[in-house]
Image: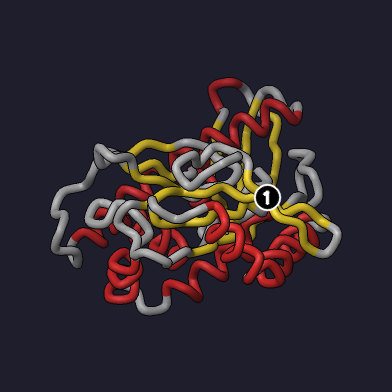
Amino acid sequence: MADASSPEAGWSIHYGGEVIRFVVRSQPQRLRGSIAIHVEPPGRVLVDAPADASRLAILAAVRKRARWVHGHLTGFRRRHTHVLPREYVSGETVIYLGRRYRLKVIPATAAEAAVKLCGSRLEIRSPDTAPASIRGAMETWYRARARTVFAARIDDMLTTLRWKSTRPPMRLQAMKTQWGSCSPTGKITLNPWLVKAPRDCIDYVILHELSHLREHNHSPRFFKLLDRHMPAWRQRKARLDELAEVILNL
């Protein structure tokens, strides 16, 4: 049977005729008896528990909030059913920095190949207009824009933080269930598709990861950092969660 020291082990409870599966993250710095539950897009349940938390205590905490967890999971599934698969053809909607643009695919020579915003359109000029080629061009463009936007937002935010003055190492990694992460060595990883979100939501994710350079956990001290530097972070997170299915549907 799983325990709090095995985050990759399978944990689950039953609620409303369904099985709710979750991952437990052991946090030695967390106060005894303090167990936090998070539901992240597109439906991942995370439980942060003190290192000495018993199996029974963790299960009891999740069962106590099972209705709340189930409600969020149901919401994620409901929104996901309305997200149509992309065909990568002219007329489709694409998103960048929270704004919607119309995709325009234009046959062109190899020398003319380019991706750029033109007014209300994202134009992709390519000698190969097959969906796979257009998808590849779009991914490359998003990644390039993400690297530029994220670096600028990190640099701007560092001017307000006392525990870090220089930009930490950053890499991009497409992820299905995370917007970002911070390694124990201080490297920041960000999901390139986050660049489709509004700037204030991007700033929330960046502050979240930069705060891990000070508190590498989700302890009360960590959330106090968020409250101090971004009092409206909960609203921004909620907005980002609402957009998750659209943003992650490249």
What residue appears at the point 51 percent right and 58 percent down from the top-left corner? 97
Q: Which of the 4 image quadrants contains residue 156?
A: bottom left
Which residue occupies the extreme bottom position in the image?
Answer: 231
Q: Amino acid type of disc 1?
A: Ser
- Left or right? Give the position of 180 relative to 116: left
Q: Which of the 4 image quadrants contains residue 49?
A: bottom left
What residue appears at the point 37 percent right and 52 percent down from the top-left corner? 27
Tell me if mark 1 has few (under 14), some (14-19) or many (20+) residues whose alpha carbon lies within 10 angstroms of its own. some
The reply to whether residue 149 is visible in this rendering is yes
What residue appears at the point 80 percent right and 62 percent down from the top-left corner? 78
Give the answer, above or below, for where 72 lies relative to 54: below
Q: Nearer the viewer, residue 139 or 241?
A: 241
Residue 10 drawn at (x, y percent) = 63, 40
- Left or right? Give the position of 170 relative to 96: left
Q: Which of the 4 image quadrants contains residue 66?
A: bottom right
The reply to whether residue 96 is visible in this rendering is no
Q: Which residue is mark 1?
A: 12
Residue 200 drawn at (x, y percent) = 43, 67
Give the answer, above or below, for where 153 lies relative to 230: above
Element carrying mark 1: strand
Residue 180 drawn at (x, y percent) = 44, 48
- Left or right? Give the position of 199 relative to 82: left
Residue 84 drawn at (x, y percent) = 81, 50
Q: Nearer the viewer, residue 80 or 143?
A: 80
